[in-house]
Image (tube, rainbow, N blue to C red):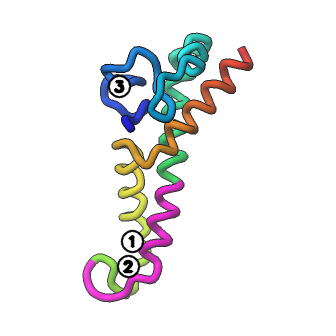
Amino acid sequence: MASLINSTTGSMPNKALTPMFNGRPDPVLQDAMKKVTPQQITKAKATATDFESMFLNSMFSQMTTGLKGEGPYGDTVGTGAWRSMLTDEYSKNFAKSGGVGISNEVFRSLILQQANKS
């Protein structure tokens, strides 16, 4: 599934006429996006991507906690700080390039909530 909010060309994949949700056109989201400002859409995209990045960072941290040995995950004094910075950068890059789909769901929820307030 293509990421709605992380594509380089805007908020929707090039070939989509309407935003997609779970692989299907989402007219509810399309209507909601008409009710919010472009600034709100931009802020919702950033918030959703940041949320996914935090989730991925937590996952990557748990995955690498018990690793011992040589190399970047070795068991030395400075490894802990370095490992946390590495997992933080991994999670940001994963989220920016489409992530695992959490940001799409968060973005949709944020836009629908904001549209209902208007």
Mark nearer the viewer, 1 or 3: 3
Q: Amino acid at mark 3?
A: Pro
Q: Reading the chain from its start, which is encountered first: label 3 or label 2?
A: 3
**Which quadrant holds the C terminus?**
top right
Residue of label 1:
83
Q: Position of residue 42 (x, y in %)?
A: 49, 25
Q: CA distance from mark 1 to mark 3?
A: 34 Å
Q: Amino acid at mark 2?
A: Thr
Residue of label 2:
79
- Mark 2: secondary structure: helix
User: Marks 1 and 3: CB-CB under 8 Å?
Assistant: no
User: Marks 2 and 1: CB-CB under 8 Å?
Assistant: yes
Q: Position of residue 28 (x, y in %)?
A: 60, 19
- Residue at 25% x, 81% y is 71
Q: Amino acid at mark 1?
A: Arg
Q: Reading the chain from its start, which is encountered first: label 1 or label 3?
A: 3
